[in-house]
Amino acid sequence: MTKSQMIQALADQYPNLHHRDLERVVNVIFDELTAALVRGERIELRGFGAFSVRNRDARQGRNPRTGDPVHVPPKRVPFFKAGRVLLNRMN
């Protein structure tokens, strides 16, 4: 589901709310989630899952085209772990 599909689904579910207001709400939620992850905070949505930031160490990679070694710098990456309720609903 894309963000625009999510907004449309909310608009279908709540016809009394304007589309532009729902778009603002979704954007604010995603902006706050992103800001929390940038600060290194953990986000837990009960019944859904948890987002966190993991650190990846620097490593030696390879250029797939030439096979030459390439230095890959350390980086922070988002990580999602599904909650038990979500996993149970899927299975």
Image (spheres, rainbow, N blue to C red):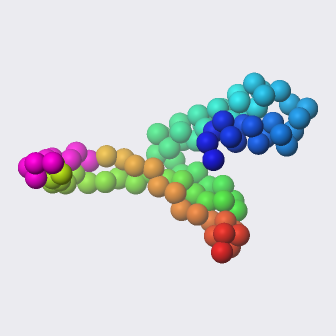
Q: Residue furthest right?
A: 16
Please tell me whether the stretch drawn in magenta is mainly helix, strand or loop.
Answer: loop
Residue 46 appears in the rendering: yes
Query: How far from the left and from the top, in percent, is residue 35?
Result: 53, 36
Q: 53 or 91: which is nearer to us?
A: 91
On the image, the x and y values in percent for residue 82 come to 58, 63
Whether the magenta-drawn stretch holds residue 23 is answered as no
Quarter of the picture holding the C terminus: bottom right
Residue 25 occupies quadrant:
top right
Q: Classify residue 83 as left or right of residue 79.
A: right
The residue sitting at 83% across, 27% down in the picture is: 18
At 85% from the left edge and 43% from the top edge, which residue is drawn?
A: 13
Q: Which residue appears at 78% of the width and 40% of the height?
A: 10
The x, y position of residue 39, in whole percent, is 48, 40
- Left or right of 49 on screen, residue 77: left
Residue closest to the eye, 2 or 80: 2
In magenta stretch: residue 72:
yes
Q: Is residue 22 above or below residue 41?
A: above
Residue 84 at least partly seen: no
| Side (left or right) of 8 relative to 42 | right
Query: Where does the magenta region start and end?
Result: 65-74
- Please give left or right for residue 22 compared with residue 28 in the image: right
Q: Is residue 73 above or below residue 61?
A: above
Q: Residue furthest front?
A: 65
- Image label count: 0
Q: Position of residue 77 (x, y in %)?
A: 40, 49
- Residue at the (22%, 51%) spot, across then down: 58
- Picture quadrant of residue 15: top right
